[in-house]
Structures are given as structure tokens and as C-alpha cells.
Image (tube, rainbow, N blue to C red):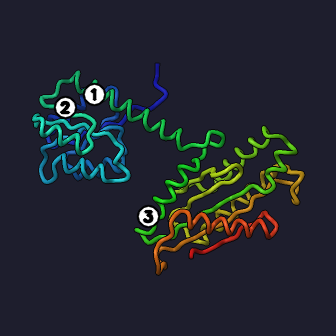
Amino acid sequence: MTSAYPPSKVLIVDDNVANIGMMADALSAEYDILVAKSAQEGLTQALHAQPDLILLDVVMPVTDGFALCRQLKSCEQTHKIPVIFVSALDTVKQQAKGFELGAVDYITKPVQIPILRARVQTHTRLYRQTVQLEALAATDPLTNLANRRKFEEAMSQEIERNQRENHALSLLIIDIDKFKDYNDRYGHGRGDDCLVAVARILSACARRGTDLVSRVGGEEFGIILSDTDADGAQSIAQAIRARLAAANIRHADSEHGYLTLSIGIATVDFAALAGGRPDSRMLVDCADNALYTAKNEGRNGVTLNHWP
């Protein structure tokens, strides 16, 4: 029976072509094999391919496996990828060092093929299960958007990254107008359908890989727009309003007769920022204040605040 999932990706990092060939031959029937012949090439492959497991030789020229493992574990994009050292260095001290650096296992050379296959199977399966559990823990079950926990984690990360790169960062806080009235009139089942429809519209309008759309409250959503200035954020906000208007979701208790949104935007331009950077709470408060203004001015509108 064909698996519902694509094969796990295994990256082999070893400067010895014969070792690479032997391990690749042993694993290629069940795994998507990637190879690198140096630590630098291995780091590049890990960053770009995001493998499910790395088989890493210790003794390599220029940069050894221990140093590469240290780099992998200190990098945000690769620190969760499991590493198995494969080495002829079989002393307790060497193996202990590997585990201290964050490796999940240590296979000594000469490699025994049944042991290699068993260890790779175990750790790729564990990694996929961990990734799936983390995804579930960070997902709103109704809308399949990121949940508030994921939103708060991403806010801190994107503030740090955009400041480091001197980019602008924008945050949209979005609230469905008169949603309680909608639930009271049409029932909570229709209310849930409404939330799902809005979530799809938001995702369709903020579709870059770096954009994060989240459900942060009952009828409240947040969109983190990395490397996006005020004009870009307003353009996305207006696109959201236009797409929702085109959907024409009936709301008899709305002044417009259809469902509308109020949107508050906070934008910080790190390249022009003279003082300290805001934290995530500051930016959320800034966007919330803009949202309150949009609500007070009659709903179905967009208000922008610059931070500070």
C-alpha cells in the first residue's frame, strides 16, 4: 500500500565518497537521500532542503562534524533536525561529546547496515511525529490557522529578524463587525461557518511564505506581515475588505446588510527607528488602538498607526 506521506529526507554529510555510497545504497529504497561532501555544503543543504534526519561524519577537513553539529543546533532553521553521528571515533568521550552537542544517536564505523536502517527508521519516525504534534499544538482546530500561541511566538521572532535586517514590519488585527449579533440571529453553527470563510479570505490575501495568519480570539484574527511597510499593509487590508464584500455573506443586523470587518494596522520601520525596538505586546497594543478607532468611526474600515 502506498504511504500517504512522501519519503523522509535523509542528508548524508561525509567527505568519503565510498561511505556516502554505502549508506545511500542501504537507505535509498525507503528515503529521499541528499548528500554533502563537506561541512559547509552540509549546512547549505540542511538550510535549503530541511531534511528529516542528518547522518554526520565527525572527521572531515576544514570543519569537522562536531563543529557542524554546533552550527546546526545554534541555527533557528535547523536546530530541531535530528543528527546521528557516524564515525570511527568510538570512545566514550567522543560519543558523549556528540550527545552533549545535541545529537540523538551515534553509530560507529564500520557501519552495520541493519543497525543503520533501524536507527534511521526510529529517528525519522520520531521527528515526523514531533513535527505533527507541534503543528497540532500551534493550530486553531476550527479554522486551521495558527493559534494565539503560535502568533505570539512568531511576533517575537519577526520583530527580532526584521530589526536585524532593517526591514519594516506590519501587524493587522482584524475583528468581525457585530459577530455576536450574527451568532444570535443565525446560530453558532453558521457562526463557525462564517469564521472559516473569513479565515480562507485572510489566507488568500496574505499568501507569502513569510506571512502568518492567526486566529487570536473568538472573532479576532492577526496577520504578521514581515518586510512590509505601511503602504503594503494597507493594500492587503483593502484587498481583504474587497474580497469579503464580494463574498456577500448576509448579515441582517449589519448597517450594510452583509458581513464586514474592522482592521487595525501597526507598522514599525526598523531602518528609521531611532530608539529601542518594540516588543510584541507594544505592537499588538498599537494595532488594537487602531482597531478601536476603526470601530468607533463606524466599522467596516481600516486604521493605521505607526510605532512609536
Disc with the residue nearer the chain's start (2 vs 3): 2
Considering the numbered disc 2 on the image, is that residue within a helix, a strand or a loop?
A: strand
Res. 177 image quadrant: bottom right
Considering the numbered disc 1 on the image, is that residue within a helix, a strand or a loop?
A: helix
Q: Residue under circle 2? A: 107
Q: What residue type is labelled 1?
A: Arg
- In the shown orientation, is residue 227 left or right of residue 243? left
Residue at image coords 79%, 68%: 296
Q: Residue under circle 1? A: 119
- Label 1 crowd bin: few (<14), some (14–19), many (20+), radius 10 Å: some
- Label 2 crowd bin: few (<14), some (14–19), many (20+), radius 10 Å: many
**Mark whose residue sits in front, 2 or 3:** 3
Considering the numbered disc 3 on the image, is that residue within a helix, a strand or a loop?
A: helix
Disc with the residue nearer the chain's start (3 vs 1): 1
Tag 1–tag 2 contact (CB < 8 Å): yes
Residue at image coords 70%, 49%: 218
Q: Which amino acid does label 2 sit on?
A: Ile
Q: Residue under circle 3? A: 160
Disc with the residue nearer the chain's start (1 vs 2): 2
Q: How far apart are marks 1 and 2 (CA)?
A: 9 Å
- In the shown orientation, is residue 306 left or right of residue 246? left
| Residue 225 visible in rendering | yes
Q: How far apart are marks 2 and 3 (CA)?
A: 38 Å
- In the shown orientation, is residue 118 left or right of residue 151? left
- Residue 258 in percent (x, y) is at 84, 54
Residue at image coords 11%, 34%: 90
Q: Which amino acid does label 3 sit on?
A: Glu
